[in-house]
Image (cartoon, coloured by chain):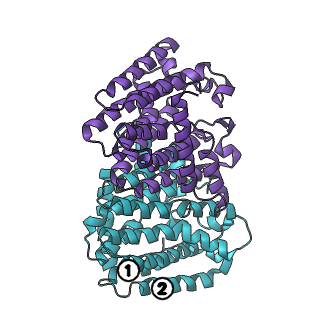
Chain colours: A cyan, B purple
Amino acid sequence: MNALQNYLKQLSEAVNTALDTLLPPAEERPVKLHEAMRYSVFAGGKRLRPALCIAACETCGGTAAQALPAACALELLHTYTLIHDDLPAMDDDTLRRGRPTCHIQFDEATAILAGDALLTLAFEVLAAQSQSGVLALELARAAGSRGVIGGQAEDIDAEGKAPDATLAEYIHRTKTAALIRAACVMGGLCAGAETQTLEKLARYGENAGLAFQLADDLLDESATVEELGKDIGSDKAKGKMTWPAVYGVEKTAADAKRLEAAAIAALKGLKKPARLEQLASFIIHRSS
Amino acid sequence: MNALQNYLKQLSEAVNTALDTLLPPAEERPVKLHEAMRYSVFAGGKRLRPALCIAACETCGGTAAQALPAACALELLHTYTLIHDDLPAMDDDTLRRGRPTCHIQFDEATAILAGDALLTLAFEVLAAQSQSGVLALELARAAGSRGVIGGQAEDIDAEGKAPDATLAEYIHRTKTAALIRAACVMGGLCAGAETQTLEKLARYGENAGLAFQLADDLLDESATVEELGKDIGSDKAKGKMTWPAVYGVEKTAADAKRLEAAAIAALKGLKKPARLEQLASFIIHRSS
């Protein structure tokens, strides 16, 4: 295990412990709802957004502990988007991270409510922080109808449509990059970083976020079910507006590399950029 | 038009104007999503939660303007719960306030996302306030898996089950009273009220909120479609765990009156309780 993998493993454990404390016990009423929330949160996710948030905080001279609540809020919110995206009325997916999706394991009503509750809990967690206002504003803007939700709305509407570069960029920027950008900015906020630094982190996050989605698109084209833990080629089968669908696989791979470089370049001037540099590379070279 | 009706009309107009500014324009991408959000927010709701929030603020010596953002956040959040509750996987309702429900007017995916976006926007609105932390904490706790969402989860699970007083009380307290309680407390917070006053407002809101749901249950038993703007007797038809289903219509009416009195009694010691007293009465004597 290399240093980055070790770092990710440690962060992941810290985040999981914190999430376990933040989530209501599975035995508490309503039991099925709380079980569903925990089922989806503890489904073996990579905790990439928390890692970016914590690494951004550390890059700005803060500690992992300072960013932990914000990191958890990001993961709670991210998990809700996965649950709702998987619903029959949306992407209608049955497999996620190698396990039945929430609405398959439980039922559709429970999946809708579990997503709602995780979204709400994300803001509850931030509300208890000293910088609650700026953190919640950053997360809400990234997650709202001009961010993640807007991206998902256009993503569904775009299914089966002719390749459209403008639309593909809108979807990728909002659906994926917006939250990754917010993760980095929130990490900076937790460290008390100043505006100029936050702008660097935002640029890093935007580029790394787009690179992440391009890598995802490429994995959908090439990886196996075992590697991915979800149905492969499902984006293609659904006629999703992916980068490869618009530009082909080769240009997508080249763009991902270009974005990785742009993300790393954005960090110039920061004191300890090494971890975020490694994460940008990890994002596009991962196999799941 | 009496003084209270006039007051409610004025507040409603102020809240609608503020909501119009807070919501993204319908022409902005994603157009269908933003149209759906506005369709459901501007569906002719009574703006009761905003009115309680603003009246509570005024009762504590604050101004309506001070509570307006919190009042809007409450209405955005309330609207999301209606959209999601109406979904096919939940209550499967086709009519709301005399118009097709969101998923009928648009589609299911759009309704899910519009609800998500309104929930997110509620917290975005609060995040911009100076008391963002305490306000968001109050709202998130009321709205989460231990509040509104928990109530809806148990409400759906309880359908068709034998009358159960404990369960009925859990559902009514969480699904309806929690948010009305939060509306009152948030109004107090906007006025900078102290703990003792906030506790009075909480007790008022809890009792008025329960009374509100009992009045709703009674209307479902007796009102006409025209009065209610939604299918009548639908709770009964679905075997919902309503108060009348557990205790009968007569005891429900008596309990509502008792709760109204308890709500008014909780205000004792506050300087200007008149408006909240009127609202408590309005809540149980309304015809829609």
- Residue B88 in picture, x, y percent from top left: 63, 40
Q: Residue at x 39, y 27 (%)?
A: B207
Quadrant assignment, res B57: top left
Q: Is residue A268 above or below residue A243?
A: below
Q: Is residue B275 above or below residue A216?
A: above
| Dot label at residue A262 | 2
Depth order, front residue of A242/B17: B17
- Disc 2 vs disc 1: which is toward the camera? 1
Q: Is residue A37 above or below residue B267?
A: below
Residue type highlighted by circle 1:
Gln
Q: Residue at x 58, y 64 (%)?
A: A151
Q: Residue furthest right?
A: A162
Q: Residue at x 28, y 59 (%)?
A: A130
Quadrant assignment, res A60: bottom left
Q: Is residue B60 above or below residue A128?
A: above
From the image, tell me which residue sits under label 1: A196
| Dot label at residue A119 | none
